[in-house]
Amino acid sequence: MATVPPGAERFLRNINKHLDTSPSLSITWEILGLNSQMHLTSSYLDIIQFIDKGIPKSSVESFSQNLAIPMTSIAKMLSMSYKTLTRKKGNERLDSSISSLIFEIASVYAKAFEIFRDLDKVTRWFNNPNKGLRRQKPFDLLNTATGIRMVNQVLGRIEEGVYS
């Protein structure tokens, strides 16, 4: 087990506080309709455990309603058939890989909300070709971890004031 350098324990505790109280994380839970359940989450390990158990289908429905994205588009983004997705009951949990993907997608949207602070601006940004993504629409890249990472990088550049 690695040893923590003297004095670093306080630093690590403070870093974890910032990570755990991130406004982006609260927005993510809000997008998924889980804010009332997850606002007291103490660590990212708790999030991983929650995702491993599966996010309820009702969270996908909240995602759809909150962002005005049709369930057909979300099913495609999650590499699921629309029929399979709609057949699930509201409290039925999705498998961990689908849960992880929808959490990551909601996190990207949360970051966009922090930057643009307006649903219309967020929607326009995700649905317009972006030079930083070789004229691809950010929304079209959200079906893979690599695409999510690329979209996050462009959002990070925008956040830092770099033309993207």
Image: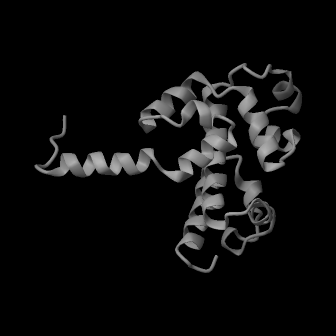
* Residue name at image x 81 percent, y 37 percent: 75
Percent x, y of residue 29? 61, 40
Identify whether 64 is placed above or below 154. above
Residue 79 appears in the rendering = no
Residue 131: x %, y % from top left: 71, 75
* Quarter occupied by the C terminus: bottom right
Query: How many discs mark residues in the rendered view?
Result: 0
Q: Is residue 17 in sight in this rendering? A: yes
Residue at image point 83% right, 47% down: 69
- The reply, left or right, for residue 40 in relation to residue 158 is left
Q: Position of residue 96 (x, y in %)?
A: 60, 28
The residue closer to the viewer here, 3 or 59, is 59
Residue 83 figure quarter: top right
Q: Residue 116: name its quadrant.
A: bottom right
Coloration of the structure image: one colour
Q: Is residue 164 left or right of residue 63?
A: left
The residue lying at 15 percent from left, 41 percent from top is 3
> Going by the image, does 56 lie left or right of 61?
left
Find residue 50 and report its horizontal and vertical position in percent.
54, 27
The quarter of the image holding the N terminus is top left
Q: Residue furthest front?
A: 36
